[in-house]
C-alpha cells in the first residue's frame, strides 16, 4: 500500500476551478449558448415610462402589428396566478393590471421571430396613465405615509434606558448607506422549451432552481412536477439571481406553452439594471452611549431600508441587517429596529451579504464616533468592545445567541502585527500633520458574520451520486455554480470520500429533475449544505461496498478500507474500478440520494430570540488610502487581509473569494452609486454611468492570507467555514481609512460622517466641511 500515490484533488488541496480552462478559452456553455431548436422565438419586455400611475388604458395594436411579432403577453394571458413573489405575499405581479409602481416596471412581453424585432416592437405601446405622486427613498416615503412592505423586526437585550443613563457620553447621528447593482457578467436569461401535456423545461441563470420551478408552475397553473429547471452555470449571481429570475422564467414559459414553440428572453443591460432589484439602501439612525474608555454602554438604532414597490426578500434582508448591526462588538444594552419601507422604485433583493454589510458599516460608524470624541485610535476602541467569552459574559448577541467560537481577538492581533499597523499609523499621522494636499488614512476593521439561512427551513440540501460500472462517478447536488467553485469543492469532498482522483468525477448541471426542493445557493451556505449532502450519499454507497466486500471474502467489515484508487480487503488490494465492476455484477446498488439539514439552529422572530446561525466566520482587513484634498480623488495604496475559513476545502479558491469579495465591498462603499432623478428614472443603468471597480482601482499592494490555524468547532463539512459573503464586509476598512484621511483636515477632532458610497465628490465635500469648521 505504500506504493500507492495520493489521490489528486482531495479536500484541503489547492485545485483550480473545474471550468476555469473552458471559461478562459470561451468554451464554457451558458444558457445563451444552448443550441436553439428550429422555431425558437424571442421575448422582450415592454415597461412603464412613468414611476407611479393608474393604468387608464393600454393600446397594444401597434405592438402586435410590428414586423416579426407573433404575440403579446399581458396579465390576461396568465393561465395560473399573476404573481412571482418569492415570499408568497402576492405583491409582485408578472404584469400589473391596474397600477404601475416604478419606472421601468414590466407591463407586457412581446414575442417575435427575433430578439431585435421584439425589442423594437416593445417601444410601440400606447398607454394612458393617470400619474400619481411618488416617493423614492425611505425618508420621503415615510413622510408620505407609504406602508411597510413587510413586518418589521425588533431585537432587544438589557436595559437600554438605564444604559444611556449610566453612560458618560452620548452621541446620536444618521448614516446614509447606498445600494449596489449586481453587475454580473451574464445578465438575466431564460429559455423555455414546451413538452407534452403540462410539461415545460426551462434553462435559466438562477441561484434558486426550485423557486423558479415553483414560480413557473404557479403562473402556469400546473403542479411543480410538470416544470423542470436546469442550470449548468451562471456568469455571476451575487444574490441578483436568487429571486429576480422568477419573472423571466415565467414569461418564457408562458410564451412557450401558449405558442408550443421554444421561447428565449434576454433583456439588454439597460433593461436588466432598470427592471431588476439591487442591494438595499439604508438610512440608519443611531443613538450611542459609552464611557471614558470608549466601552459601549447602550445602543439604539433604526434601520430604514429602500425596499421598492414589493416585499421580495426585504424582510429577511432587513432582519439580517439587525443581526449584523453589532459586527464584532458586544452591546450590553441594545435595541435595534428595522423599517422595510415601501418606495416607488424597483423591488430590491438579495445581494452578497444580504443586509449584513449594511448593519456592520453602522457598527463601524459608531466606533468611529467614539474614537473621534475621545481622541483615540479607532482600533483601540474596536478592541475594547470586541466580544469576549464565557469567562467575562460579554458573548451574547442582541438576538440572544451565545458566541462560542470567537477568534476575532487573535485575528486582529496577528493582522495588526503582520501589516505593521502601529508604525504605519504613526508615520501617517506625522505626515498628515505637515498639512500637505495629499492626506493619508489607515484603518483596521473586523468582521463577524453569522452563517445559516435565517429562514430555518432553507438549511437543507440534497444530492445524487451514481457510480457507474466502469468506476466513473456522476455527481449532482442542489447547489448552483456561479463562478465561486462550489462544484469543485463538492467534487473534492466526494473524491476524498471514495479515495479516487478528482478527474474520475463528472459534475453535472443542477436540475430539479434529480434533486428536488433545493434551497437557494445563497447565505454563504452552498458548500456547507451540498458538501454534507454529497458526503451522505457517498457514505451510503461506501457502506454497501464495504458490506459486499466483506461478505464476498468471508471477512469482517473492519478488514475493508479505501485507499488511493484502490480498496484493501484483508490482504487483497484491488483497483477501485475493478471492484466496482465486481459489485455491479453482484447487483450491489451503486446509486444514492444524500441529504443534510443544519443542526442546532432555531429562531423565534416574534420574540427576537434564538440561534439563527450555526457558527460565525471572522476576518480582518487593514487598508491604507491617499486622498487629494483639492479634488476628493483617492486611491487605495495597500490592503492586508487575514480571513478565517476554518479548515479550507480549497485554499486557492477560498483566497480568490476573499479577494473578489473585498474588491466588491470596496466598490459598494466608494464608486458604485445608484442615482434616480426626480422623475423616478434610474440614471445609472449601464456600465457607462455605473462605476464598478476596475483593475486599476485594486490596492497597489494587496496581501491576502487565510488563518491556517483555524478549524470550525462545529461539525461542518471537513471543519471548513463559509467564504462567500463574510469577506465582503472587509471592504469597510477602505471607507474607514478614507474617513481618517478626511479627519486629518480638522486634526481628527471631528467624525467626518462620510456617507456611502464615499465618491470623490462626497470626500471633497467632507474635506471642505471640516476645513470650514476649523
Image (cartoon, rainbow, N blue to C red):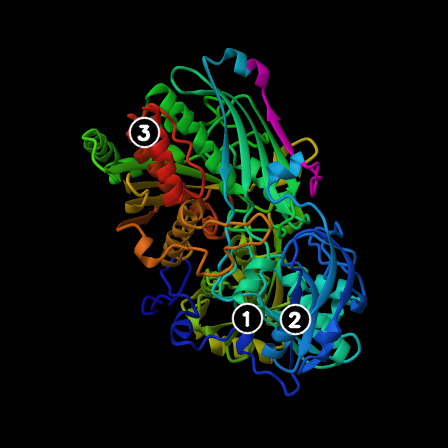
| Among the two numbered marks 3 and 1 on one chain, the one whose residue lies closer to the N terminus | 1
Depth check: give the residue in front, 542 or 43: 43
Picture layout, residue 299 above or below residue 405: above
Kindly identify which residue carries mark 2: 122
Report helix, strand or loop for mark 3.
helix
* Quarter of the view holding residue 74: bottom right
Q: Which residues are magenta?
A: 144-162
Mark-to-mark CA distance, 3 and 1: 55 Å
Task: Check residue 232 in the rendering and tell me which mark sits there, or answer none.
Answer: 1
Taking the magenta stretch, the answer to whether it contains residue 161 is: yes
Task: Check residue 771 in the rendering and tell me which mark sits there, or answer none.
Answer: 3
Depth check: give the residue in front, 109 or 277: 109
Q: Position of residue 509 (x, y in %)?
A: 56, 71
Mark-to-mark CA distance, 3 and 2: 52 Å
Depth check: give the residue in front, 710 or 336: 336
| Among the two numbered marks 2 and 1 on one chain, the one whose residue lies closer to the N terminus | 2
Residue found at the far bottom of this picture = 38
Residue in view at x 38 percent, y 27 percent: 751
| Among the two numbered marks 3 and 2 on one chain, the one whose residue lies closer to the N terminus | 2
Q: Quadrant of the C terminus?
A: top left
Q: Position of residue 723 (x, y in %)?
A: 45, 50
Report helix, strand or loop for mark 1.
loop
Q: Main secondary structure of the magenta part?
A: loop
Residue in view at x 75 percent, y 65 percent: 217
Q: Position of residue 703 (x, y in %)?
A: 28, 49
* Quarter of the view holding residue 586: bottom right
Count of labels shown?
A: 3
Residue in view at x 51 percent, y 64 percent: 481
- Which one is in front in this view, the residue at disc 2 or the one at disc 1? 2
Amino acid at each position: 500500500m505504500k506504493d500507492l500515490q495520493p489521490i489528486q484533488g482531495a479536500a484541503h488541496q489547492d485545485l483550480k476551478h473545474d471550468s476555469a480552462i473552458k471559461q478562459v478559452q470561451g468554451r464554457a456553455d451558458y444558457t445563451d449558448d444552448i443550441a436553439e431548436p428550429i422555431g425558437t422565438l424571442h421575448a422582450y419586455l415592454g415597461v412603464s415610462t412613468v414611476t407611479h400611475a393608474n393604468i387608464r388604458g393600454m393600446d397594444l395594436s401597434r405592438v402586435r402589428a410590428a414586423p416579426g411579432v407573433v404575440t403579446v403577453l399581458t396579465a390576461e394571458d396568465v393561465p395560473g396566478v399573476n404573481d412571482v413573489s418569492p415570499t408568497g405575499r402576492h405583491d409582485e405581479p408578472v404584469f400589473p393590471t391596474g397600477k404601475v409602481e416604478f419606472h421601468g416596471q414590466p407591463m407586457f412581453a412581446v414575442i417575435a421571430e427575433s430578439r431585435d424585432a421584439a425589442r423594437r416592437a416593445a417601444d410601440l405601446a400606447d398607454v394612458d396613465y393617470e400619474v400619481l405622486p411618488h416617493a423614492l427613498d425611505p425618508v420621503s416615503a415615510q413622510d408620505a405615509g407609504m406602508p411597510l412592505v413587510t413586518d418589521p423586526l425588533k431585537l432587544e437585550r438589557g436595559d437600554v434606558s438605564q444604559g444611556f443613563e449610566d453612560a458618560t457620553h452620548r452621541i446620536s447621528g444618521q448614516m446614509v448607506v447606498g445600494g449596489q447593482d449586481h453587475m454580473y457578467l451574464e445578465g438575466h436569461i431564460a429559455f423555455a422549451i414546451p413538452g407534452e401535456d403540462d410539461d415545460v423545461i426551462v434553462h435559466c441563470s438562477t441561484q434558486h432552481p426550485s423557486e423558479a420551478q415553483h414560480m413557473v408552475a404557479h403562473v402556469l397553473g400546473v403542479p411543480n412536477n410538470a416544470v423542470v429547471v436546469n442550470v449548468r452555470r451562471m456568469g455571476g449571481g451575487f444574490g441578483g439571481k436568487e429571486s429576480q429570475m422568477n419573472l423571466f422564467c415565467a414569461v418564457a414559459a408562458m410564451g412557450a406553452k401558449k405558442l408550443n414553440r421554444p421561447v428565449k428572453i434576454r433583456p439588454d443591460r439597460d433593461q436588466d439594471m432598470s427592471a431588476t432589484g439591487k442591494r438595499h439602501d439604508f438610512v440608519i439612525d443611531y443613538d450611542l452611549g459609552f464611557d471614558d474608555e470608549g466601552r459601549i454602554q447602550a445602543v439604539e438604532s433604526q434601520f430604514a431600508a429602500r425596499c421598492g414597490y414589493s416585499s421580495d426578500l426585504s424582510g429577511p434582508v432587513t432582519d439580517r441587517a439587525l443581526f449584523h448591526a453589532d459586527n464584532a462588538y458586544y452591546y450590553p444594552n441594545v435595541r435595534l429596529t428595522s423599517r422595510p419601507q415601501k418606495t416607488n422604485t424597483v423591488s430590491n433583493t438579495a445581494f452578497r451579504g444580504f443586509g449584513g454589510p449594511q448593519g456592520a458599516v453602522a457598527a463601524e460608524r459608531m466606533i468611529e464616533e467614539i474614537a473621534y470624541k475621545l481622541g483615540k485610535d479607532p482600533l483601540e476602541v474596536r478592541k475594547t468592545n470586541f466580544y469576549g467569552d464565557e469567562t467575562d459574559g460579554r458573548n451574547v448577541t442582541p438576538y440572544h445567541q451565545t458566541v462560542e467560537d470567537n477568534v476575532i481577538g487573535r485575528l486582529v492581533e496577528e493582522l495588526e502585527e503582520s501589516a505593521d499597523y502601529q508604525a504605519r499609523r504613526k508615520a501617517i499621522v506625522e505626515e498628515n500633520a505637515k498639512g500637505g494636499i495629499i492626506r493619508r488614512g489607515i484603518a483596521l476593521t473586523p468582521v463577524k458574520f453569522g452563517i445559516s439561512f435565517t429562514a430555518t427551513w432553507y438549511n437543507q440540501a440534497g444530492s445524487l451520486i451514481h457510480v457507474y460500472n466502469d468506476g466513473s462517478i456522476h455527481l449532482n447536488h442542489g447547489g448552483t455554480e456561479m463562478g465561486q467553485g462550489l462544484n469543485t469543492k463538492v467534487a473534492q469532498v466526494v473524491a476524498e470520500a471514495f479515495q479516487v482522483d478528482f478527474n474520475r468525477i463528472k459534475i453535472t448541471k443542477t436540475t430539479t429533475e434529480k434533486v428536488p426542493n433545493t434551497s437557494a445557493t445563497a447565505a454563504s451556505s452552498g458548500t456547507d449544505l451540498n458538501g454534507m449532502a454529497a458526503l451522505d450519499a457517498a457514505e451510503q454507497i461506501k457502506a454497501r461496498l464495504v458490506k459486499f466486500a466483506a461478505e464476498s471474502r468471508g471477512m469482517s467489515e473492519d478488514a475493508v478500507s479505501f485507499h488511493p484508487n484502490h480498496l484493501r480487503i484483508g490482504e487483497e488490494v484491488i483497483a477501485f474500478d475493478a471492484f466496482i465492476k465486481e459489485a455491479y455484477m453482484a447487483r450491489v446498488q451503486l446509486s444514492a440520494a444524500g441529504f443534510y439539514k443544519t443542526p442546532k439552529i432555531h429562531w423565534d422572530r416574534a420574540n427576537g430570540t434564538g440561534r439563527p446561525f450555526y457558527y460565525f466566520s471572522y476576518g480582518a482587513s487593514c487598508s491604507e488610502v491617499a486622498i487629494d484634498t483639492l479634488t476628493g480623488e483617492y486611491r487605495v495604496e495597500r490592503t492586508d487581509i487575514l480571513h478565517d475559513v476554518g479548515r479550507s476545502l480549497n485554499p486557492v479558491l477560498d483566497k480568490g473569494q476573499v479577494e473578489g469579495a473585498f474588491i466588491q465591498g470596496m466598490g459598494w462603499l466608494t464608486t458604485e452609486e445608484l442615482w434616480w432623478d426626480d422623475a423616478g428614472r434610474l440614471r445609472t443603468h449601464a456600465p457607462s454611468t455605473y462605476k464598478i471597480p476596475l483593475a486599476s482601482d485594486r490596492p497597489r499592494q494587496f496581501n491576502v492570507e487565510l488563518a491556517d490555524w483555524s478549524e470550525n468547532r462545529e461539525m461542518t463539512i471537513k471543519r471548513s467555514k463559509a467564504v462567500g459573503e463574510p469577506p465582503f464586509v472587509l471592504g469597510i476598512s477602505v471607507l474607514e481609512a478614507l474617513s481618517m484621511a478626511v479627519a486629518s483636515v480638522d486634526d481628527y477632532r471631528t467624525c467626518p460622517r462620510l456617507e456611502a458610497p464615499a465618491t470623490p465628490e462626497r470626500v471633497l465635500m467632507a474635506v471642505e466641511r471640516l476645513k470650514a469648521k476649523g
